[in-house]
Image (cartoon, coloured by chain):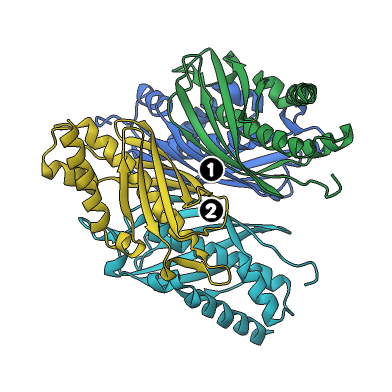
Chain colours: A cyan, B yellow, C green, D blue
Amino acid sequence: MQNQHALMVEKLANIVTAIPFNRLLGLKLNHISAEHIELRFAMQQELIGNFLQGILHGGVISSVLDMAGGLAAMSGAIKKHPHHTEEELVEIVGKCSTIDLQINYLRPGRGELFSAKAWLIKQGKQLSFCRMELSNEENTLIAMGTATYLLKIKNSF
Amino acid sequence: MQNQHALMVEKLANIVTAIPFNRLLGLKLNHISAEHIELRFAMQQELIGNFLQGILHGGVISSVLDMAGGLAAMSGAIKKHPHHTEEELVEIVGKCSTIDLQINYLRPGRGELFSAKAWLIKQGKQLSFCRMELSNEENTLIAMGTATYLLKIKNSF
Amino acid sequence: MQNQHALMVEKLANIVTAIPFNRLLGLKLNHISAEHIELRFAMQQELIGNFLQGILHGGVISSVLDMAGGLAAMSGAIKKHPHHTEEELVEIVGKCSTIDLQINYLRPGRGELFSAKAWLIKQGKQLSFCRMELSNEENTLIAMGTATYLLKIKNSF
Amino acid sequence: MQNQHALMVEKLANIVTAIPFNRLLGLKLNHISAEHIELRFAMQQELIGNFLQGILHGGVISSVLDMAGGLAAMSGAIKKHPHHTEEELVEIVGKCSTIDLQINYLRPGRGELFSAKAWLIKQGKQLSFCRMELSNEENTLIAMGTATYLLKIKNSF
């Protein structure tokens, strides 16, 4: 059982870094538990949105929170089908799409190392709802959000 | 009057390309009128979010729509203060921040050339509300959104 | 064809007034066209949210915009299945549910007669996306919003 | 100190029931602590939105969550100014307005007694951000949301 979890974490970590835009952002999967998932990334010159203040671009924040929520939704779907084949995993991931994303920008995106956490609040047959938060290395809450994902899962799973 | 408009367009176009994250996205200001602003960008390998389908990352979409709305809010603030100095322009731009962003993902982000339009719906003393849309080169509507911006404008303007 | 449209309008108008909470709000269906639907309601003492200012409760605004969007989604679904039986109509209406609702409050809800308009932006197999606006009798825009609806439509339709 | 808290709770409870639309909904303030506020209301025939299923109107849910978030924002503002006069309290309450509201509808609004909780996530000088949840008497989570409020507080406080 533990091995299955480790395997899923490894697979999802690979998926995160395989997505081109995530590599630009420097996103890395840090943690998956039953309760939530966590992504991390470091400040880089390229991620700045406000050159006067040296803070994260709002789009970096929305991108990371969308990805974190999507991974929470995918990991929930994978757990529901623990005996998936590699092909089925690719299908779960490839067909997960964001429907609605909503972000509240609470404080300027200042910091060196950022953590994006996502909680899967409700997993339905087709729709998954997540809640997300972005903090910096001092645990300052920078943004929060919610997102809804459509999961197209084959009945045969 | 026409010259002033052309000057503002040039300045805002420079601001768009001066922001590091916007350069990653390849964003260019295409048009500013009394009614709306328009940004354009081309598909690139780096902007892909779903390697199975070759479509835009959801975060690219939210980033571009946030930037488009922000420019509509800024351009509204600048028009209210037509005789701004260069310093005041920098202050308007540097202090404009997104409060809330909301995106509806309508269709997969497929295409070669994308257009993000933003309309300034209400400009208040401190808050500006915008509506945004992303389309591809075939005028297929890919996403819509709304955003609220906080503008810190000196009374002395 | 015209008769079918008139019949659908009458049926949807009946549905609006059959819903208990809509009767509290005094909601009436005013118009359905290919482009949009419109609901109307009058100011009443019971709908006030701020007794100092005598303006609409924010919840009245969100309620009305949610209902307007839902009707736009339903009317789109009904048009797709023009030869529905009475039973099928009841099923379309009874199984339409809001997934996500988002409202921007632009100006105080002052006025005597309010109009809520909704546009069906995208109608998918299961999901419909709408955009909504609330204005008063002077055409002052009070609020705008977006909503996503889940439609459970039998394949046999 | 305890007495001041009790007094504020009593005043806010009076405000909740003084708002006409809240009386329609049957809203009552149940609890205010440093962490969150809680409103309660009972199912009534008038609050039904779907007559086939006998569930809460989506607008009831958005109304109650908006009110809960607004009270959390107000109570935060009042705590910042513990030595307010009655007049200042009226001003804090009368000038608190919702800017943006966003609701995710997770499950049908089925139940007899509903609880709406709101947490004040960030309190700024002018803007307050809240997170809200609606549950029934069996602790089933029916909806979640976020909202942003504008508070106009006199400097002289």
Say if mark 1 contacts mark 2, CB within 8 Å: yes
- Disc 2: which chain? A
Residue B72 locus on image (x, y percent): 33, 41
Q: Which residue is mark 1?
A: D102
Kindly identify the residue that appears in the image at 24 percent across and 29 percent down.
D156
Q: Amino acid at mark 1?
A: Gln
Q: Is residue D139 above or below residue A27?
A: above
Kindly identify the residue that appears in the image at 65 percent across and 68 percent down.
A76
| Residue D40: quadrant of the picture | top right
Position of the N terminus of chain B, as image quadrant, is top left
Q: Amino acid at mark 2?
A: Thr
| Residue B22: quadrant of the picture | bottom left
Within-10-Å neighbours for mark 1: few <14, some 14–19, many 20+ = many
Q: Which residue is mark 2?
A: A146
Q: Which mark is residue A156?
A: none
Kindly identify the residue that appears in the image at 75 percent across and 29 percent down.
D44
Position of the C terminus of chain B, as image quadrant, is top left
Instruction: Determine the secondary structure under disc 1.
Output: strand
Residue D37 locus on image (x, y percent): 53, 42
Q: Is residue C95 above or below residue B58?
A: above
